Amino acid sequence: MSLIQVSNLTFAYDGSYENIFENVSFQIDTNWRLGFTGRNGRGKTTFLNLLLGKYDYQGRISASVEFSYFPYFVADKSVLALDAVEAMYPDYEYWKIQREMAKLQLDDEVLYRSYGTLSNGEQTKLQLAVLFSKENNFLLIDEPTNHLDIRGRELVSQYLSTKKGFILVSHDRAFLDGCVDHILSINKSDIQVCKGNFSTWMENKQRQDAFEQAENEKLKREISRLEETAREKAGWSDTAERRKLRSGPMDVDNVKGWRPLQGAKAKKSMARAKAIEQRQTAAIEEKSKLLKNIERSDTLKIFQTPYHTKRLVELKDVTIAYGQEPVCGPVSFTIQKGDRIALQGANGSGKSSILKLICGQEIPYTGEFWRGNGLKISYVSQDASNLRGSLSDLARDSGIEESLFLAMLAKLDVPKAQMEKDMSSLSAGQKKKVLLAKSICEPAHLHIWDEPMNYIDVISRMQIEELLIQFQPTILFVEHDRAFCENVATGVVAL
């Protein structure tokens, strides 16, 4: 066992006036299974890169272990997977790779196929097998779930629960609950370490937020009362001061002789006013310490466009095939107004092909497919990496109101400074929020979302869940976040 010590860490990217981290200090144990969470753009991947020594920073990071990072970058995907393994880890031992692959239910034959022909899920599992075949390394695992289906996520979560010594970045609540024993959270104003799984951390956070909200309300009432009292005391002291000036320099006290009676009264009133002012200032300072870590989670709104019939889409015994090999089918289901249907199945089972068929793309199929006349569909694709240009241009090209679009992004915790940048510079999660905000703002009869929660932080996932439950838009979606599906879906179509 050893410790990774972070002391007074301060970091900003070159050319940026905003610090990602400022005087951050904490320590973590290298035996922990550490879940790493925080809203998009807070610096989770940046922190992993700081541990890897990729950037200069102020402060100190000390560790007696070496770090290894997932995902690996594979430059040439045409090589055999075994050659890709050697490029990832030149000192690998074959039997150790085999051992980890078996635990991940990955067959040996995968190693003798071209790396580029492996599914995204197979590539993820192979890279994890390489990562955990290393010894005496502390592992930095950055969002491994994005290319795993629900079954794959359950398997990898169970696999990780048998390991130790890693930081795991993920926004999948069920996945984290299954495999971590501590949480490292990047909050609005600090970084905290909490013992337990994600649900334990969320419960503690909600309890702390509720306490701070209650204390904030008490302090607001106290400040209001002090302000009123201060105004009264200020009025009294002003009156006493005026009397003092009108009465001359001295008043006569027949018992004690000469003394400045009016001046003393004025002085006493002003002292009381000053004391109340100091108490008020102290209360305001105390209030300023609260609410620093309460995450903004504004209610989202979606405007569903009415459609003239209850039935929107219907598939009867539809089979999709590219060439001789069928991708999926036969599949039958109907989408009606108000349905929230989760389309589920293993990677490669044809989910995205069905979504594209419904969206109007040229997809080869047999069977019966019907889509309502004039049906307006808003589509969110898996991939947001190709976003370029300004948000204003995207709003104009999409025919949506720019002010509404930007307000939706603000509610999803995209900072105003980020909105002014080219979209290519946004984080992966922020890019996905751009696609989701655009879809929410588009007038549509049917929303089709393909893995919308990839890279999206937990707080935003919960906001979107509440949006879909409250406003009940008609939606067909593919998503591998089990908690999201259980909370949102009114029906499931399994391939």
Image (cartoon, helix red, strand yellow):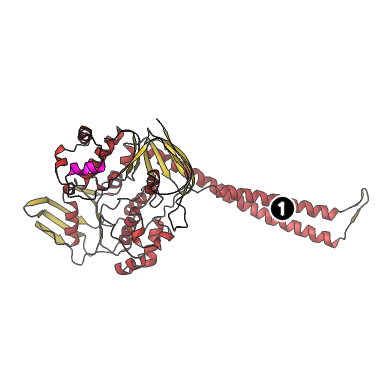
| Residue 91 is one of the magenta-drawn residues | yes
Residue 52 visible in image: yes
> Is residue 406 left or right of 266 when viewed as pictured?
left
Observer-nearest of 111 and 433: 111
Which secondary structure type mostly characterizes the magenta part of the structure?
A: loop
Pinpoint residue 100: horizontal percent, then vertical percent.
Answer: 23, 34
Q: Which residue is mark 1?
A: 273
The three-letter code of the residue at mark 1 reads Ala
The residues colored magenta run: 70-93
Observer-nearest of 70 and 194: 70
Instruction: Name the residue furthest front.
Output: 90
Q: Tally the marks.
A: 1
Pinpoint residue 11: horizontal percent, then vertical percent.
Answer: 45, 50
Pinpoint residue 111: horizontal percent, then vertical percent.
Answer: 16, 41
Disc 1 is placed on an element classified as helix
> Is residue 255 left or right of 335 when viewed as pictured?
right
> Is residue 61 left or right of 126 when viewed as pictured?
right
**Quarter occupied by residue 437:** bottom left
| Residue 451 is one of the magenta-drawn residues | no
Instruction: Name the residue furthest top.
Output: 1
**Quarter occupied by residue 447:** bottom left
